[in-house]
Every structure is written in C-alpha cells, then in structure tokens.
Image (tube, rainbow, N blue to C red):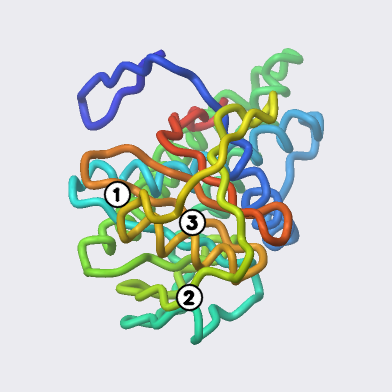
Amino acid sequence: MATLVDGRVEFRKVFEFPLALHGPATNGLNKIWNEITYPIIEEPREYENFQFIAFWNTLAALANCVAEEGHGGAIVIVPAGKTASAKALRIKYPQNSSILRDAFIAFMNVRHRIADYVVRMERGENSVKGEYALVELEIAEVHSQLVEATRFVARLSGCDGAIVISEDLRLLGFGAEIRSELKPKTKSIEVLDELKKIYKPLDVEEFGLRHRSAIKIVSQESGYCVLVVSQDGPVSVIWSEKDGIVNVRRGANLVNLNMPMA
C-alpha cells in the first residue's frame, strides 16, 4: 500500500487498523451525531462505516502530520465533555476552538449529500448530473479545509508541550505539561497484536520523557488516550481499557484510510 502526501508517494510495508483509536472515534462521533445531516437514500451501513473511518482517519492524520514536522510531540485525547484535569495537565495556551470539529462536520455533510446524488444517478436519474458536478467541487473544497485544519492543529506541536483535544475534535489547548505521577500498582504492557491479544510486560523507565508522561496520565485519568510521536517519526498509542493496566502500542502504522467521498 502507498499513500500520496504533498506530491510524494510513501510506501507502507504493513497495513494496520489499530483498535486503540476505536474508543475515541466512537465516543467522538456519538457527541457530534446530531450535528451531521445524513443521506436520505444511501444505506445507513454505508454512510455509518464511512463516517467512522473518516473520524478515525482524522485522529490518525493528526499524529501523521506531527510526524511530518520532524520534531516529535504528543496529542492527549480527553473524553468529550470532560474538562482536562488541572492536576494532570497544565495547559500553557488554553483554547476552546472548534476549527477541526467544524471542518469535519462540514466535510461529512457534503459527502452525505453527494452520496445520494451517486445513488440517484445509478438509478438512472441523469437529470441530477449538473447538481452532482457542483457538489463535486464542494466536496473538494471542504476536504481541503479539513486537511488544512488538521495540519494547523498538528503544527501547534512546534510549541514545547502536548496538544490537547477532546474526543469530539475540539482543540482544548497546546503547550501542555503533563503533571501526573504513575498511579500505584499500575502495570504497563506492550500490545504486540490487538486482535490476538498478544502482550508483554513493559518497564516504564525504559522509555523517554514523552512516553513516560503519557503512561502516567493514562494511569491516572480514565478515558484518556495519548498519541506519542517520536522525533524520528514512529507513533505510539497509549490507552487503558482496565483500571490498573496501561496499554502501549509502539510503532503503530496509522495509514490514512478514507478517500474524499468513497
């Protein structure tokens, strides 16, 4: 598999769909569900599947964009509707920006409209071809806006500290310092294969500062997920499914999956 990034073809040796981002993607979509206008004709399973992949892809794209910057960083994903704990995080530049959230919703709304035009044309309604052509231009525009919003948020990693977003894609701040200490009796495990449930124990001290800080905040804060991008590019996903256990997936291959309208 290969992806085209700013005119460069990047080849991927492994295709993965890390399950660690399923929780934030599902929870985030649930929060913005009523703000999206859904297709009238297209089957729900089609647009629901696309929507989930698009949301997952947006989270992955944030990490990939940070990796492209070449300086590393961390993205802390906080449960939607939950204020980031001041004890856990000191956010140097607090925000309450919906730039990424709004761009995602706008993209999905246009995508859903164009999906119905496609179904109608497949049924032989050629009279809608002119309207379809106009919406094709619109989907290109809103997709570009989503890409640029993602890049804008990712570039905030250039400030010393982590980017903090909510599960529903609201930018809560950047330049954040993780203050948490490791919760007593916490076990850290490396996830080697999520589907086969293959793990191995980890020593927190074998990691660098970003990874150690991410493990500490996840051990203390229920529902937090952290994407840690190393300076040389690899991405780790750190999350918890059971109290007292922190999962670490090193070298996660967050391939951007969805096309503009699929």
Evaluate whether residue 173 shows in this view.
yes
**Residue at the image position 43 percent from the left and 44 percent from the top:** 236
Whether residue 44 is situated above or below residue 156 in the rendered picture: above
Q: Nearer the viewer, mark 1 or mark 2?
A: 2
Instruction: Find the distance from the CA under tag 1 to the CA under tag 2.
Output: 23 Å
Quadrant of image for the N terminus: top left
Q: Quadrant of residue 83?
A: bottom right
Whether residue 89 is situated above or below residue 23 in the rendered picture: below
Locate residue 211 relative to residue 232 in the image: left or right. right
**Residue at the image position 35 percent from the left and 66 percent from the top:** 162
10 Å crowding of disc 3: few (<14), some (14-19), many (20+): many
Image x and y of residue 259, in percent: 49, 28
Q: Which mark is residue 226?
A: 3
Instruction: Find the distance from the CA under tag 1 to the CA under tag 3.
Output: 13 Å
Residue type marked 1: Val
Q: Which mark is residue 167?
A: none
Cβ atoms under marks 3 and 2 closer than 8 Å? no
- The kind of secondary structure element at disc 1 is helix
Residue type marked 2: Ser
Image x and y of residue 59, in percent: 49, 48
**Residue at the image position 70 percent from the left and 49 percent from the top:** 26
Locate residue 80 relative to residue 69 in the image: left or right. right
Q: Disc 1 marks which residue?
A: 66
- The kind of secondary structure element at disc 2 is loop
